[in-house]
Image (tube, helix red, strand yellow):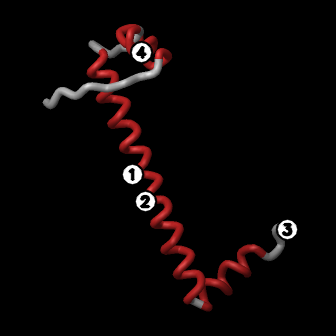
Amino acid sequence: MTTIELTLEDSQIHFLEQCQSYGFKDKSEAIRAAIQYFSEQLEGQRQLEDSAKLYAEIYETNEETRALTESALSGWPK
């Protein structure tokens, strides 16, 4: 592993000082877990946005898809 230097807010330092009470063996493990979690959340968000763009593109270019969507929406309150 590589060692880096970080600048943190006081509240973040306070959290890291309590990291063992959250089940982390040390501050480094807590930071690695936080970065991993954040990375996974960002990747999931990116995939969701890509999927939404693809569905929007399909909706715009496919008349059958638009008709199917409109028929599914009929009867729903606007």
Answer whether labels 1 and 2 touch (C-beta < 8 Å).
yes
Tell which residue pokes out farthest to the left in this image.
1
User: Going by the image, does 74 lie left or right of 23?
Assistant: right
Give the label, 3 or 4, closer to the camera. Answer: 4
Q: Earlier in the sequence, mark 2 or mark 4?
A: 4
Answer whether labels 2 and 3 touch (C-beta < 8 Å).
no
- Label 4 sits on residue: 13
Q: CA distance from mark 2 to mark 4?
A: 32 Å
The percent position of residue 58, horizontal first and vertical second, equals: 53, 81
Count residues near mark 1 (Cα–Cα under 10 Å), then give few for <14, some for 14-19, many for 20+: few
Q: Earlier in the sequence, mark 3 or mark 4?
A: 4
Answer whether labels 3 and 4 touch (C-beta < 8 Å).
no
- Label 1 sits on residue: 43
Query: SS of the residue at dot 1?
Result: helix
- Label 3 sits on residue: 78
Tell which residue pokes out farthest to the right in this image.
77
User: Going by the image, does 54 lie left or right of 73?
Assistant: left
The percent position of residue 64, horizontal first and vertical second, equals: 60, 89
Q: Amino acid at mark 4?
A: Ile
The percent position of residue 30, horizontal first and vertical second, equals: 33, 22
Residue 3 versus residue 73 in the image, above or below: above
Instruction: Give 3 or 58, whichever is nearer the viewer.
Output: 3
- Label 2 sits on residue: 47
Count residues near mark 2 (Cα–Cα under 10 Å), then give few for <14, some for 14-19, many for 20+: few
Residue 53 versus residue 20 in the image, above or below: below
Q: CA distance from mark 3 to mark 4?
A: 49 Å
Q: Amino acid at mark 1?
A: Glu
Q: Amino acid at mark 3?
A: Lys
Count residues near mark 4 (Cα–Cα under 10 Å), then give few for <14, some for 14-19, many for 20+: few
Query: SS of the residue at dot 3?
Result: loop
* Picture residue at 39% right of the left edge, 51% below the top: 43
Query: SS of the residue at dot 2?
Result: helix
